[in-house]
Image: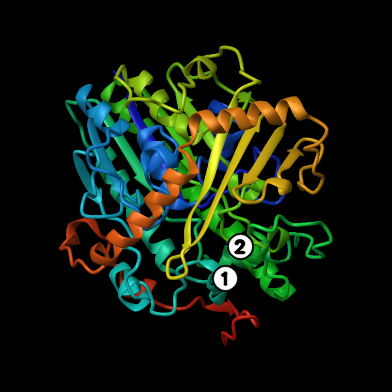
């Protein structure tokens, strides 16, 4: 039985990688892993938000089907994950760091945890209490437009947390174990706050490009309100410099864990497979967006690398794949059963040198109650098939989009009327696989009622949490202020 190591970062866009063609970013370790294994060049997140994407990955089911469509939602403890399946196959299932579990169940199939998480158990606590539980400075932003309030070079809770996670992973890999190991290493970077080590921030500041900010193309009305049109160019450049620096910082950590895993395998005479993915991407100022949650490439297109015994070396696969495929793929590698009713498929045939499937369609979703008090609701769906991407938002039928991403990488030319047969097949797939919108709406309303109680619960999960050192609780040494949000340097 092969040992398996899954490294999952948070908010790393596929676009910011050397092997993906970015001429500025320095990612020597990811480039090395890609050359020693197989890179899935067209991988999408099933949901461009943290918790839904991760729970979908663990179960192999779309967010609307596994029931998690918000960062405030908890996965049902009775639902099987691939960690459960690997455990039943004889693996020690070890979680090191972040998985962003919500609620009192912080394991969901992991038999051991060797490093805690950085985020709170529930997400509707007041920001000060939320930040305190994370060991984060009380002005560190939690997300949304306020993510522009802290930008620069220096130290941050994210950087310190990720160092802590990797040190624990390296220590664990120095051991010898009777059972085959499945080790999941989860970092928080390159998630905002946009703070990179000072030397990396300064290195990238004059090298990064600033995306077009003219906004001359028509945006979809469902997401138009997320655009920050008046962001100062200095702030946009600073965000991108910090993000690039954070990606390079993560690359170094990934390299350390990869090397430690290879040493562990060699020392114990074992075979193994290393996997790298991220839960979703990051806009970093693309088209005026920051963070994630849209279906544009920086947000939805994720890295996915496999390397190890039985994996083709130096291969690039260009057919559409999904983070949902991680569950059935790892289960097949491990010789384990898969969780029931999978939306993902095993990628092992492609990884072992088989045909690169070009006509597969993969789905991504976004939605839920976006404003609990007013019960405003949004549900969007995306289908990716090869070069084409279809986007639909409930209530905006006349605004459907189809982009030829190869010919139109900026996604500004809507060709939905030119390919009626393709669009029709994509719509049929959505109707077949996604939960009906009325069911999703009912779930959202029930969740909001439950959250009124659950969000006030005080659980003692100290062993599941990371406690930040004092050095992580300071502003960057060099900080750019956002004039839009009135932050001072």
Q: Earlier in the sequence, mark 1 or mark 2?
A: 1
Q: Which quarter of the picture shows residue 407?
A: top right
Alpha carbon of mark 1 to alpha carbon of mark 2: how far?
7 Å
> At x 56% / y 55%, what residue is drawn?
292
Q: Position of residue 264 (x, y in %)?
A: 31, 32
Q: Viewer-proximal residue, 130 or 21?
A: 130
Is label 2 in a helix, a strand or a loop? loop
Q: Position of residue 26 (x, y in %)?
A: 62, 49
Q: How is the image coloured?
A: rainbow
Is label 1 in a helix, a strand or a loop? helix
Of the numbered discs in the image, which one, if any, rests on residue 449?
none
Up the image or down, 89 lies above or below 284; here it is above
Q: Viewer-proximal residue, 232 or 228?
A: 228
Task: Say whether marks 1 and 2 touch (CB < 8 Å).
Answer: yes
Residue 121 visible somewhere in the drawing:
no
Q: Residue furthest front?
A: 438
Q: Position of residue 463 (x, y in %)?
A: 18, 57
**Circle 2 Cα neighbour tier, 10 Å, few/some/many (<14 / 14–19 / ≥20):** many
> At x 83% / y 32%, what residue is drawn?
418
Residue 287 visible somewhere in the drawing:
yes
Give the residue at mark 1.
145
Q: Position of residue 145 (x, y in %)?
A: 57, 70
Give the residue at mark 2.
290
């Amino acid at each position: 039985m092969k040992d398996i190591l899954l490294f999952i970062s948070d908010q790393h866009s596929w676009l910011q990688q050397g092997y993906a063609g970015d001429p500025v970013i320095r990612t020597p370790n990811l480039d090395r892993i890609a050359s020693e294994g197989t890179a899935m060049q067209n991988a999408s997140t099933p949901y461009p938000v943290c918790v839904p994407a991760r729970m979908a990955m663990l179960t192999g089911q779309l967010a609307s089907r596994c029931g998690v469509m918000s960062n405030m939602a908890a996965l049902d403890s009775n639902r099987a994950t691939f960690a459960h399946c690997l455990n039943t196959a004889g693996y020690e299932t070890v979680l090191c760091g972040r998985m962003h579990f919500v609620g009192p169940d912080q394991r969901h199939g992991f038999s051991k945890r060797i490093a805690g998480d950085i985020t709170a158990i529930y997400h509707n606590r007041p920001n000060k209490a939320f930040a305190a539980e994370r060991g984060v400075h009380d002005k560190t932003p939690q997300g949304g437009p306020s993510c522009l309030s802290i930008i620069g070079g220096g130290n941050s809770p994210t950087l310190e947390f990720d160092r802590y996670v990797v040190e624990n992973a390296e220590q664990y890999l120095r051991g010898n174990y009777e059972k085959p190991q499945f080790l999941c290493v989860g970092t928080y970077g390159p998630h905002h706050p946009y703070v990179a080590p000072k030397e990396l921030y300064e290195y990238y500041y004059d090298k990064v490009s600033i995306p077009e900010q003219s906004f001359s193309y028509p945006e979809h009305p469902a997401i138009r309100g997320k655009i920050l049109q008046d962001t100062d160019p200095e702030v946009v450049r600073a965000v991108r410099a910090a993000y690039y620096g954070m990606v390079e910082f993560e690359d170094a950590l990934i390299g350390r864990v990869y090397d430690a895993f290879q040493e562990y395998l060699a020392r114990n005479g074992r075979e193994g497979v290393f996997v790298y993915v991220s839960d979703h991407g990051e806009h970093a100022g693309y088209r005026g967006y920051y963070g994630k949650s849209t279906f544009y490439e920086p947000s939805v297109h994720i890295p996915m690398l496999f390397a190890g015994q039985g994996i083709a070396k130096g291969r690039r696969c260009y057919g559409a794949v999904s983070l949902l495929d991680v569950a059935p793929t790892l289960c097949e590698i491990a010789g384990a059963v898969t969780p029931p009713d999978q939306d993902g498929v095993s990628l092992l045939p492609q990884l072992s040198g088989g045909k690169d499937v070009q006509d597969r369609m993969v789905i991504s979703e976004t939605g839920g109650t976006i404003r609990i008090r007013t019960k405003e609701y949004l549900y969007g769906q995306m289908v990716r098939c090869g070069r084409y991407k279809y986007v639909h938002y409930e209530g905006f039928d006349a605004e459907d989009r189809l982009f030829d991403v190869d010919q139109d990488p900026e996604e500004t030319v809507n060709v939905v009327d030119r390919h009626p047969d393709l669009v029709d097949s994509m719509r049929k797939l959505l109707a077949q696989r996604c939960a009906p919108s009325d069911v999703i709406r009912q779930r959202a309303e029930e969740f909001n009622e439950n959250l009124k109680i659950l969000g006030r619960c005080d659980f003692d999960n100290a062993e599941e949490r990371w406690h930040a050192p004092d050095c992580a609780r300071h502003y960057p040494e060099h900080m750019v202020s956002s004039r839009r949000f009135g932050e001072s340097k």
